[in-house]
Amino acid sequence: MKGFKNIGLFTSTVNSEKIFIAKQIEEILSSKGCKILYDNAFKKENSLKNLKTYSSRYLSSHCDLVISIGGDGTMLSCSRLYGLQAIPILGINLGKLGFLTDIAPDELTNKLQEVLSGQYSLDQRFFLESNVKGNKKKHIALNEVVIHSGSIAKLIEYELFIDNCFVYRQKADGIIISTPTGSTAYSLSGNGPIVHPDVKAMTLLPMFPHSLNARPLLVNEKSEIIINICNKGKTEISLDSHNESKLREGDSILLSKAKSKLTLIHPKDHDFYSACRNKLGWSLGLPY
């Protein structure tokens, strides 16, 4: 991949810490001859009213890298805006976990200089694509698609088909269909497996199933999944906890791997297992 010269800065919400980090990034990148373009999101802050900002459409056509400043939630928003346009994304972690955003503020100068000098690795992730049969509009998720009742402690009933093969009919609070990226997100809180990003699979995790033998399923990333809604009550679909819509009895939801891919930029020393160890508390209490 070529060197980065036109670099966009993105955040979902603006506060003093993010402004400080953004200005620090601008100083580092400008000293290396890079052009900095701020996303319109920065205009929400009164102190930045005189800052020149640009629309996501403009950044998409003029940037060869976008830096996301925030946590994984900010990265999800950035991925929808820019990752889908095949623009590489680098994450500065100001959140709590940060599986997608891996540069800490105190490492900012060194890590950015390394990336600009070509010392980085590429990490490609796939998106999930979903649509309701009969509806041409398709929706995209990076982490997961969740089909649920929209209420606490309320079951829905659905049929699951994988590659046109009937798998089961089940009553549960819902079902989570996640990518390897999403295995450390909502699926993790449902006791789903942690899946390495290089594993080409999707995870299907029932939520509180009314069954003693229901287990998560890992299927090939190329699989086509169909979920038929069988209950008459309230049912909803949620994508990355962002895009939500209502479903009804008889709806068929089609899910598959999207054609678009997300390209993440990592520093050379990035290590998935180290991230798990540090962020999930693995090995705590072991003597060294």
Image (cartoon, rainbow, N blue to C red):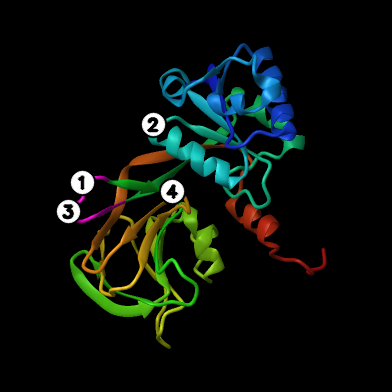
Q: Residue at x 69, y 13 (%)?
A: 31
Location of residue 47 in the rendering, given as x and y in whole percent from the top left corner: 71, 22
- The secondary structure making up most of the magenta span is loop
Between the residue at mark 2 and the residue at mark 1, the CA separation in whole angstroms equals 21 Å
Q: Which residue is mark 2?
A: 85
Question: Which of pointers 2 and 1 lies earlier in the amino acid sequence?
Answer: 2
Question: Which of pointers 4 and 3 lies earlier in the amino acid sequence?
Answer: 3
Between the residue at mark 4 and the residue at mark 3, the CA separation in whole angstroms equals 23 Å
Q: Residue at x 45, y 17 (%)?
A: 62
- Report the amino acid beneath label 2: Gln
SS of the residue under disc 3:
loop
Location of residue 266 in the rendering, given as x and y in whole percent from the top left corner: 57, 38
Between the residue at mark 4 and the residue at mark 2, the CA separation in whole angstroms equals 14 Å
- Report the amino acid beneath label 4: Leu
**Label number found at residue 134:** 3
Between the residue at mark 3 and the residue at mark 2, the CA separation in whole angstroms equals 26 Å
Q: Give the residues drawn in magenta, as a range.
A: 130-137
CB within 8 Å, label 4 to label 3 = no
Q: Which residue is mark 4?
A: 142
- Residue 66 magenta: no
Does the rendering let one see residue 221?
yes
Location of residue 196 in the rendering, given as x and y in whole percent from the top left corner: 50, 57
SS of the residue under disc 2:
helix
Say few, some or many: other residues with alpha carbon within 10 Å of mark 2 (under 14 / 14 to 19 / 20 or more).
Answer: some
